[in-house]
């Protein structure tokens, strides 16, 4: 039996590589002679730069930045061997996991740290900047990022670019998005992801109004309809700023990653693909890793099973053609306990063993 193990990270618990190793161990527990190929994945969110760095042969750069609250930190990104391409995760400097739950507030959280990493890469001579958009603590529409790159916003909310970083004009930007969400509206960044970042219902309304105003500014500057643009709401609207102000193309993160690792070729002739992420819910099918792997499996006529740390069952998931959909967390275990790194690994190993045994 030939099995491909291709999960995303289990946020707050395991990296994609750690999750893949745990699932692989479970497969081999059930079937020691199984031919297992491990392919850690990402979709634009946390860990994207690490996955792409492995595929492209990049080195790690550590630079000064600030976290979403403006506190000084060191953050890492990937730089290609020739120094021309930088791969930067928004989550590295502006990620939700950098802010303690009691301090999370998307009204004040900023992407300034992400802009500082981009500036560092430009200073080093990079001329192709790939930005992984996912896992952010922010809903500032990328304004902090732009300000760190020298853009300023006037009293009339117009954009002054006269002091923008000198290397921006020779650089090409690529936005690697983890969701298809637009900047504004009931399915936009504020309404869908604001609550996950600490926003109350009243805060969501304020965030939406602010995002609509910012989208108008960006549309005036870039000459494109940003408010409803597919993927423009990724990372709290940072994708919209990248598109309108920095000229970035907005790409499906999982599609970029799958192409980089040669996924379609890897799964050809396999008997089963096992994917997964920390939480599988209605948002999973909106451009996330699990959805991308399922689509690849359908194209190759290979069965795909998914393991979630937790699963929020709904009609969309029930109708999706997974060979199996398994929750790793035991029903009698608390979420806090299940998210401990060692426990999460054990749960994944048991779940994948059960999956193979039951097939």
Image (tube, rainbow, N blue to C red):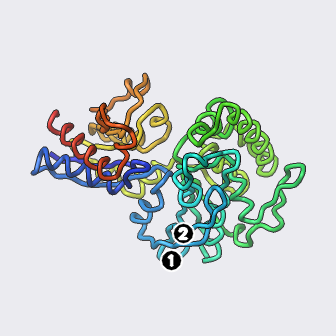
Q: Quadrant of the N terminus?
A: top left
Which numbered marker is on residue 85? 2
Residue 357 in the image: above or below residue 56: above
Answer with the quarter of the image where residue 227 lies.
Answer: top right
How many neighbours does mark 1 have within 10 angstroms: few (below 14), some (14-19), or many (20 or more)? few
Which residue lies at the image location 74% right of the left edge and 72% below the top edge?
Answer: 166
How many neighbours does mark 2 have within 10 angstroms: few (below 14), some (14-19), or many (20 or more)? many
Which numbered marker is on residue 82? 1
- Give coordinates of residue 236: x percent, y percent: 63, 45
Residue occupying the far left of the picture: 33
Of 53 and 23, nearer the camera is: 23
Residue occupying the far right of the picture: 156
Left or right: where 56 falls relative to 342: right
Which residue lies at the image location 50% right of the left edge and 36% below the top edge?
Answer: 286
Pointer 2 with pointer 1, Cβ within 8 A: yes
- Give coordinates of residue 197: x percent, y percent: 59, 43
The Cα–Cα distance between marks 2 and 1, rounded to whole angstroms, is 8 Å
Answer with the quarter of the image where residue 171 lies.
Answer: bottom right
Residue 176 in the image: above or below residue 198: below
Of 214 and 341, nearer the camera is: 341
- Give coordinates of residue 232: x percent, y percent: 64, 44
Q: Quadrant of the C terminus?
A: top left
Which residue lies at the image location 39% right of the left edge and 43% below the top edge?
Answer: 336
Of 226 and 67, nearer the camera is: 67
Q: Secondary structure at mark 2?
A: strand
């Amino acid at each position: 039996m030939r099995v491909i193990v291709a999960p995303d990270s289990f946020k707050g618990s395991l990296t994609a590589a750690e999750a893949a190793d745990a699932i692989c161990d479970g497969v081999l527990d059930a079937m020691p002679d199984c031919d297992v190929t491990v392919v850690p994945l990402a979709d634009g969110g946390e860990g994207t730069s690490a996955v792409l760095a492995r595929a492209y042969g990049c080195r790690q750069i550590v630079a000064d930045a600030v976290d979403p609250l403006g506190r000084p930190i060191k953050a890492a990104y990937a730089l290609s061997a020739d120094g021309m391409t930088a791969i930067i995760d928004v989550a590295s400097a502006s990620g939700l996991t950098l802010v303690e739950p009691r301090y999370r507030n998307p009204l004040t959280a900023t992407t300034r740290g992400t802009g500082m990493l981009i500036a560092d890469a430009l200073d080093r001579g990079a001329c192709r900047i790939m930005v992984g958009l996912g896992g952010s603590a922010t809903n500032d529409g990328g304004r902090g990022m732009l300000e760190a790159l020298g853009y300023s916003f006037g009293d009339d909310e117009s954009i002054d670019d006269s002091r923008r970083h000198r290397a921006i004009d020779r650089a090409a930007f690529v936005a690697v998005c983890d969701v298809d969400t637009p900047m504004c509206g009931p399915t936009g960044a504020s309404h869908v992801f604001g609550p996950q970042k600490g926003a109350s219902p009243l805060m969501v309304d304020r965030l939406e109004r602010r995002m609509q105003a910012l989208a108008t500014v960006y549309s005036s500057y870039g000459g494109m309809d940003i408010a409803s643009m597919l993927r423009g709401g990724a990372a709290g609207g940072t994708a919209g700023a990248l598109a309108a102000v920095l000229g970035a193309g907005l790409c499906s993160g999982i599609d970029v990653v799958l192409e980089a690792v040669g996924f379609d070729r890897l799964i050809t002739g396999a008997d089963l693909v096992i994917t997964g992420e920390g939480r599988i819910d209605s948002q999973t099918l909106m451009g996330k890793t699990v959805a991308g792997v399922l689509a690849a499996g359908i194209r190759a006529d290979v069965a795909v099973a998914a393991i979630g740390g937790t699963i929020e069952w709904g009609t969309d998931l029930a109708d999706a053609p997974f060979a199996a959909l398994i929750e790793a967390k035991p029903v009698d275990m608390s979420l806090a306990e299940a998210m401990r790194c060692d426990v999460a690994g054990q749960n994944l190993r048991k779940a994948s063993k059960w999956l193979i045994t039951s097939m």
